């Protein structure tokens, strides 16, 4: 294929990638987006293979087969809950590939390159290498292979700074003496080290953000490779991923109420105070994600039962509750309310508040009328209720509330609980519902959580 | 101009025609105000307050009326009270002229210029003087409270450890001012509220206070598009009656409010319909004073028939004497100010409101319906 | 590399950055995770460079071996990335 | 097992211990149920309904108790009624054992196993049997309706052509079940509601029903951070009392609900404080049966003192007999079911609830506070 | 300046344009956006003047001065209400400029051009010319110089089609004989004609959309010029404007509930049914804009008074009203409610409903307490009230409500009225408030209007 | 013009279109009118072409005269467009 035709196809691929990302902006088109982006990738790979003068097809075939088997197997086997770590691993592979390509090109060019090419190649390698080891660290943290708590030691920042400086110094050396493999290898090793050191001081809670940032880096690395190879496909796609990744990182930081600078800086050695107390436990870990996840689940429910409790009353969240119910109702979700007889702090507490918010009587169901329906319900939203949804009343004969009829919320596919903490309700007893696999906790004042959820669903 | 506020002497009447607040403003306009001692007591306004805002207290009603150029009252004056009025003076009160022919004759005889607050034209402009509106507001509110207090059930729905309490079903017949207020109040308390009125345009108003309007589903056959409203067929009317019967039987509380100006109230609830209701249900008949919308209503009394409590209170506004007096007083104040021009009191007989509310003047009965009815009854 | 080419490269870089940033700005929070995964798959485009490196010369030498490694890594990224994304999106209704 | 439902004979008591709906479910559990003729009439449940759901009507109370293994009642039995009970039978009712020593002695003497519904432990588990909760719900609701019906003002704010009506200020003292319900109901009606309780933890609960909690602003000087709650200084207490006095004087309606289990109700409103209120204001004393929270309360009566109406109704739930009976019946039903195991009726004296609500058994007074008080009073 | 430096500056300009448009996406940064874009433009112009071998600076200076004076004067003098027509005129100038540049280049190249250059030049000229006359027509329509009603005649579509074909035919001819000035001029004239004919059959109500579409066209023309001149600045900027314009057009169509295809098609000759009844009257004309304008005004108010009336009750819009009030309150707007004593259909009607929606009592003001404040209020939002805000009660002694106290809403800077039509209220009388200069009518059910407004303000 | 250049032009065109479309998608409705006006001002970039045409040759000929006209028109567009936009934006608080 002529170089022009190849470039045209590359343009088409880039367009498909952009469309792919665009379609990912709505749940209804997201799958199509992923598909288009796959086509774009296929086209780019295919057309590259027709590059005039390309050799080594056996090697290429073997490489692709090995990669496909490993990648495909891992992707299919991974549990839904381990997705983020898997993404980290894949991303690390991308970074490694960029670094390797840069190294190969370095070897190809020998000593004959202008400084622009040298710089871009170096950047590609450094960023790629750092992404590789950084991603591996993120994976290890999320899998619990190394402590999820921030790992710190005295002089940490100094050491990181020193390594960065050393890398720079070696780069300058390389400029003087382009073909020097030793210096080159030194840079590679330092960049790999940098990836490790940059990620270990960060708490498990921040890992999703770091993965996202590393994803952006791997894009940057690709685009640097593109500059070096003067390949527009790599430039466009790389910068696309780089820019979108950095923005996504920022959006995630916003969701966690942290500044991007704070995370970026902490990513290079400073321990973030808040990381300390969110470091442990699965609930805390994914906090930044949860609001969105919860919104996704709610928006995609077919049937929803809302279980209000004293927390709804305490937060005076009845209007916000109705807003959420109404919005989902309009979206075609079947919304009902399950009112436990002792929810709240006075008989009829929930009724009084929901009537104030104008929730129609015919959406309210008493325990005995709705309890059998939980098993066939997609999502239960528990708003500040605790004792009235405590399964201990059924399974734990030693519980003080054993024998009290409770709402069988745990039988639903997913249970979402809005409350401020893990603390107990009126009866003062723990609630194992909160630890069940199908339960998602969304911490915070019920009213503000609800308002944020509605806002997130309306985008 | 001397304005006198008489104490109400009718049994069970706690309101007062003017409260101190209004008197303060009227004084500024040049009125000299005399108040009978103790006039405001029952409504929660003390003599002291009256004095503080510039009124002169007069202990004898006789003395008061003898001086007054204008007397203001809540309820229609008794014949004695009318007799005591100064010849040629002005009277402003609810007069119920279409019913009280003897009183009207007496007023005419004494050359009294009498304004009936109950016949003020019901225009937007006159609404601030309209005691029917303000007192109906109170009646509608109070009717629901009375019903809720009388019935042996809850109004709101409650889901409790001691079972689920079904909300009370409230039916309001006639959705005028009182009816709408009743709907709104019952809704507030958590009742499931339905209303019916012969005027189809109030359907929207009923919905606007959160209640459901009872409508006869339009029969598909027959004339078809539009038009049925005018020539409401007997069949249609019958269907309507059946529908209402059904709703009455289902309701825990029925509040009929239908009045026809100047006439006896129409009967909307027959004895059979009362009997069809659950024992313990309540009817609060807001038309009691005009004979009642329920066939069994005893004006002024609360009775139990077929297990249903029928409240025939004939003066609900008086039970809320404090605010009722405040509103009444404001109405009279606005009416008096309407009778003034820039320079002070001066009745403009050309004015629609002034003329429309005139019962007698210069020895003649001005109000048309009244004079017609009086003529009829003499025959 | 001549300056004209570099400037064109820069132009494309800047435009693509804008397009990337703006495209992301519209993605609702609910899709952030699949999006991260989807764009990660796209960054596997490094495979193009890997292929070119592997096929650089007729004989197998250090360059083509490094390229071979790069192909494996990049393929893992591409295949794994798209598959995981698809699985995540399966969570969504319709 | 034969279960007998006695008709209530106490003056003004309209409730019934079991309603047909519960009887249906209990019959299925193997209870054989006898009902005194006319037991449910006053609450709106006819003999016919009872028969339809499988109860046997018995016209004489004497005959009924003679047969019954277990008698259920609402109010504490009179001494005659207690006398008529079969020896060794079971009694389930409100017993007020801490007050009615003679009755308790009689029950013990007759070897009756008596359960006091009023002393069931107030745990989450027991809430479905807790008549104090369910009846307090009614009292709180009804207190507000009574107040709104009694007062000469509106509860809601209204801006009308006849002036602006200020909303009523409602003060609830004691925010237990009844107090919270009163807050919620008054808020619903449009009142501006404030509440106070000695238990600081109810502040949040008060807010949760839309009312304001009255708090002594923490004095900046002095101890400073935290801690003051435990060692509430006299100065602090005095400030609190002053603050409440201020709020009482401003309020149109005061609803005190403070009870101390097994004791006379504390006095929260002195005569002076009553006098400080506007004439026409209303106090509905929910503690009337226990002597009242207001110094002037006359249990069972409505009086007017210093121009303030003080309602001392001692049995508000009975005025809502239909729903009150429904709730009471549901409570008893759950209690009876609690006394059963899979195979039927079988009291488990190990059980916290069963044991906790026992007044007498096997000739002995089991309830500790009761036996202590009885011993004390004998001295 | 070297061509490379110039191209770098062009890139910077393009970046500034993109940032400019980006910043226009939020009211708080919009001014900065406009400023950045101005800088970009200045830089582009400045650097162009340093192009090696550029002559004719006198001519250029004169041209710039003339253009500045005309453009500046017109922009400063135009009334706020005539902004859209002014934008149309300016846009027409842009189109004319593109067409002229294409013509000049055509003359420069003589007969020596490849087909790509020829095509792009032709497209630039045709689109530019069409934009020029089309914009003039849009201006004339909005100014009322020609009928705002759709102008139609038999065979209209046929004629338009014929002209399009003729243009194509001439273009083909030109391909055969590149230097032919006659054919060239023919194409120019046809394109000018096309602009006129395409716009006249469109009703005044659709003009804003048409202006936006023509704006997009002028961008396209510029980008075609860029291709012809191989000038990346023009390509980027032109396609930026072209793409954003077409999307903005689509968004506007959505707001009017019309499809883009419908408008595009109608733009070439088909009469749109709905245009018929919206053709006349200023209120109808700008309907599609109003919701956004109203939202803008509300969002930018310092003080707001809400005046509810029977329409709010009829629409059961009390919760939506509270939502709007709460939202604006959170945004720092001072929000109060003015309750007229006879608003609604029963005494206290508004109070009952607003209490249900939990509007705090202390935000409610009776007529006598708030009437003096209207004069110092930025915005009054009248929700379904009519008689109670009718100034006739003050000025028109013959009005049946003369003498009734009414709310002096017209004294506020801006009055926004939400109702379904121009129809009368309870008293059955016309209300001249609705025709005042500072009154904006937003037609529709009050509840849905309010919900849309809140949605628009939250974007 | 050589195909490589055209492809680069196309690449830039496509990217700019994406950027333009995505940038606009985020503009709230309240800003549509100023935005239309603002982007209209930007389309005055045709002035670059106009300047080049005017300054094409040393002498004044038909090309430079056409260019001159184009300069006037384009300047009106630029100056008028920005000024009107600024005035519209003045409506906004702060
Ligand atoms: N209904 C009655 O008549 C009555 C009367 C008295 C007692 N009770 C008892 O009260 C209990 C009622 O059960 P329930 O499930 O309704 O309530 P609950 O068991 O008391 O639990 C309420 C939960 O709401 C959360 N919460 C409090 N404020 C919140 C806020 N602002 N935002 C979000 N969450 C908030 C609390 O958790 P965080 O602190 O972690 O947020 C708490 O765990 C029962 O045990 C019942 O027996 C009922
Ligand atoms: N308060 C009382 O006690 C009482 C009692 C009886 C009569 N009135 C009279 O009622 C009037 C009250 O004045 P007002 O200003 O409140 O009301 P109004 O003058 O009756 O005007 C209400 C306006 O609301 C609009 N509207 C109706 N439904 C709507 C909806 N769903 N969405 C949006 N707008 C809607 C109507 O215009 P469109 O049809 O164009 O939408 C109408 O012009 C006074 O004349 C008063 O005298 C009052
Ligand atoms: N202009 C004003 O500002 C103003 C002021 C007050 C009242 N009004 C109007 O006057 C109307 C009458 O007010 P009102 O409350 O004094 O009315 P009302 O007390 O005279 O009658 C009450 C209602 O009963 C209805 N009714 C009569 N016969 C009936 C029957 N057989 N079945 C069912 N309903 C029946 C009437 O239609 C009326 O709605 C109000 O609806 C109001 O719109 C206007
Ligand atoms: N576990 C359950 O499910 C359950 C069921 C019912 C009640 N309860 C709890 O029991 C508590 C008591 O309920 P109750 O309604 O029967 O209480 P109550 O009727 O015994 O007393 C009413 C209130 O008065 C208050 N009070 C006492 N002295 C006072 C004083 N001097 N000044 C002001 N207030 C004073 C008390 O604190 C109490 O809140 C409730 O708040 C509730 O939380 C729990």
Image: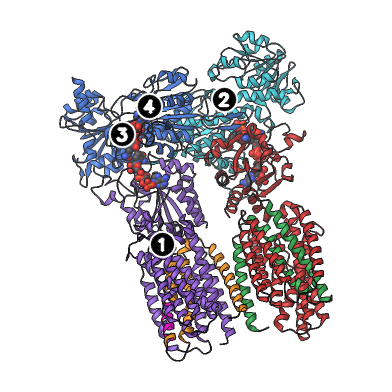
Chain colours: A purple, B cyan, C orange, D blue, E red, F green
Name the spot of residue A247 as percent of width and height, x first: 51, 63
Q: Is residue B286 left or right of residue A384?
A: right
On residue D237, the disc is 4
- Quadrant position of residue E184: bottom right
Residue wearing tag 1: A157
Q: Nearer the viewer, residue A289 or D349?
A: A289
| Front: mark 4 or 2 | 4
Q: For the residues tagged 2 and 3, is the chain the same?
A: no
As measured in the structure, the alpha-carbon distance from the residue carrying label 4 to the one carrying label 3 is: 43 Å
As measured in the structure, the alpha-carbon distance from the residue carrying label 1 to the one carrying label 2 is: 78 Å
Q: Chain of mark 1?
A: A
Q: Nearer the viewer, residue E320 or F51?
A: F51
| Front: mark 2 or 3 | 2
The quarter of the image holding the N terminus of chain D is top left
Label 2, ligand 3: CB separation under 8 Å: no
Look at the image and give the residue range highlighted in magenta.
C64-75
Name the spot of residue A107 as percent of width and height, x first: 46, 84
| Front: mark 3 or 1 | 1
Residue wearing tag 2: B324
Q: Is residue D223 left or right of residue E148?
A: left
Give the structural element (helix, strand or loop) at label 1. Answer: helix
Q: Chain of mark 4?
A: D
Answer yes or no: do the residues labelled 2 and 3 have beta carbons within 8 Å? no
Q: Nearer the viewer, residue B358 or B322?
A: B322
Q: Nearer the viewer, residue E260 or A39?
A: A39
């Amino acid at each position: 294929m002529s170089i022009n035709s190849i470039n045209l196809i590359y343009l088409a691929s880039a367009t498909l990638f952009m469309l792919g990302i665009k379609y990912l902006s709505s749940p209804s088109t997201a799958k199509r987006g992923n598909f288009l982006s796959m086509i774009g990738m296929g086209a780019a790979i295919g057309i590259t293979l027709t590059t005039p003068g390309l050799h080594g097809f056996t090697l290429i075939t073997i490489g692709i087969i090995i990669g496909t088997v490993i990648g495909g197997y891992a992707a299919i086997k991974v549990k839904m809950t381990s997705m983020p770590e898997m993404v980290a691993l894949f991303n690390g592979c991308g970074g490694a590939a960029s670094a390797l390509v840069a190294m190969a090109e370095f070897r190809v060019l020998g000593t004959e390159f202008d400084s622009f090419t040298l710089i871009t190649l170096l950047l590609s390698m450094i960023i790629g290498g750092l992404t590789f080891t950084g991603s591996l660290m993120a994976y290890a943290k999320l899998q619990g292979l190394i402590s999820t708590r921030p790992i710190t030691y005295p002089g940490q920042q100094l050491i990181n700074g020193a390594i960065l400086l050393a890398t720079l110094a070696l780069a300058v050396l390389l400029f003087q003496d382009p073909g020097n493999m030793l210096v080159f290898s030194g840079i590679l090793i330092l960049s790999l080290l940098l990836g490790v050191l940059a990620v270990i001081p960060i708490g498990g809670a921040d890992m999703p953000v770091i993965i996202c940032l590393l994803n952006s880096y791997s894009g940057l690395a690709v685009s640097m490779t593109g500059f070096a190879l003067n390949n527009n496909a790599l430039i466009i796609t790389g910068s696309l991923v780089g820019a979108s990744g950095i923005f996504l990182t920022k959006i995630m930081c916003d969701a966690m109420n942290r500044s991007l600078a704070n995370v970026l800086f902490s990513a290079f050695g400073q321990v973030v105070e808040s990381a300390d107390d969110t470091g442990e436990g699965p609930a805390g870990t994914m906090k930044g994600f949860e609001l969105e996840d919860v919104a996704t689940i709610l928006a995609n429910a077919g049937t929803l039962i809302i279980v209000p409790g004293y927390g709804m009353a305490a937060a005076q969240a009845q209007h916000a509750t109705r807003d959420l119910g109404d919005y989902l109702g309009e979206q075609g979700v079947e919304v009902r309310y399950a009112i436990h007889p002792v929810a709240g702090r006075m008989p009829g507490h929930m009724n009084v508040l929901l009537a104030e918010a104008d929730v129609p009587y015919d959406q309210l169901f008493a325990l005995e009328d709705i309890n059998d329906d939980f098993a066939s319900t997609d999502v239960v939203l528990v708003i500040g209720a605790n004792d009235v949804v405590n399964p201990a009343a059924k399974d734990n004969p030693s519980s003080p509330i054993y024998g009290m009829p409770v709402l069988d919320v745990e039988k639903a596919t997913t249970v979402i609980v809005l409350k401020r903490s893990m603390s107990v309700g009126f009866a003062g007893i723990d609630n194992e519902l909160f630890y069940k696999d199908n339960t998602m906790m969304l911490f915070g004042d019920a009213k503000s959580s609800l308002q944020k959820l509605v806002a997130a669903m309306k985008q | 101009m001397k304005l006198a506020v008489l104490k109400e002497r009718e049994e069970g009447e706690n309101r007062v025609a003017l409260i101190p607040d209004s008197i303060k403003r009227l004084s500024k306009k040049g009125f000299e105000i005399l108040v009978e001692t103790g006039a405001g007591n029952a409504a929660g306004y003390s003599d002291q307050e009256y004095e503080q805002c510039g009124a002169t207290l007069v202990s004898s009603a006789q003395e008061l009326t003898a001086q007054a150029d204008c007397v203001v009252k809540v309820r229609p004056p008794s014949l004695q009270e009318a007799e005591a009025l100064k010849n040629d003076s002005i009277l402003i009160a609810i007069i119920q002229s279409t019913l009280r022919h003897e009183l009207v004759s007496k007023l005419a005889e004494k050359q009294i210029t009498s304004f009936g607050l109950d016949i003020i034209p019901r225009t937007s402009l006159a609404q601030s003087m309209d005691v029917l509106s303000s007192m109906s507001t109170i009646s509608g509110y109070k009717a629901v409270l009375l019903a809720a207090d009388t019935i042996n059930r809850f109004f709101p729905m409650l889901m409790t450890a001691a079972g689920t309490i079904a909300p009370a079903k409230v039916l309001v017949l006639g959705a005028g001012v009182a009816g709408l207020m009743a709907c709104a109040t019952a809704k507030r308390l958590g009742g499931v509220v339905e209303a019916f009125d012969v005027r189809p345009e109030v359907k929207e108003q009923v919905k606007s206070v959160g209640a459901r309007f009872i409508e006869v589903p339009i029969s598909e056959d027959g004339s078809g598009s539009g038009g049925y409203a005018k020539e409401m067929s007997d069949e249609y009317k019958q269907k309507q009656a059946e529908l209402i019967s059904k709703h009455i039987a289902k309701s825990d509380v029925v509040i009929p409010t239908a009045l026809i100006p100047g006439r006896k109230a129409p009967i909307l609830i027959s004895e059979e319909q009362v009997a069809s209701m659950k024992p313990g249900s309540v009817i609060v008949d807001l038309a009691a004073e005009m004979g009642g919308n329920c066939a069994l209503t005893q004006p002024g009394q609360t009775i139990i028939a077929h297990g249903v409590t029928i409240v025939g209170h004939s003066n609900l506004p008086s039970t809320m004497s404090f605010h009722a007096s405040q509103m009444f007083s404001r109405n009279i104040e606005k009416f008096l100010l309407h009778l003034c021009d820039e320079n002070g009191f001066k009745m403009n007989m050309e004015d629609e409101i002034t003329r429309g509310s005139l019962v007698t003047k210069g020895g003649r009965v001005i109000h048309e319906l009244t004079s017609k009815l009086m003529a009829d009854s003499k025959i | 590399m001549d300056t004209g080419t570099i400037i064109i490269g820069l132009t494309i870089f800047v435009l693509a950055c804008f397009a990337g940033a703006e495209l992301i700005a519209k993605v609702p929070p609910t899709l952030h995770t699949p999006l991260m995964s989807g764009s990660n798959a796209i960054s596997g485009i490094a495979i193009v460079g890997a292929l070119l490196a592997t096929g650089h010369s007729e004989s197998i030498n250090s360059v083509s071996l490094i390229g071979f490694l790069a192909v494996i890594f990049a393929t893992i990224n591409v295949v794994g990335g798209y598959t995981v994304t698809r699985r995540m999106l399966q969570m969504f209704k319709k």
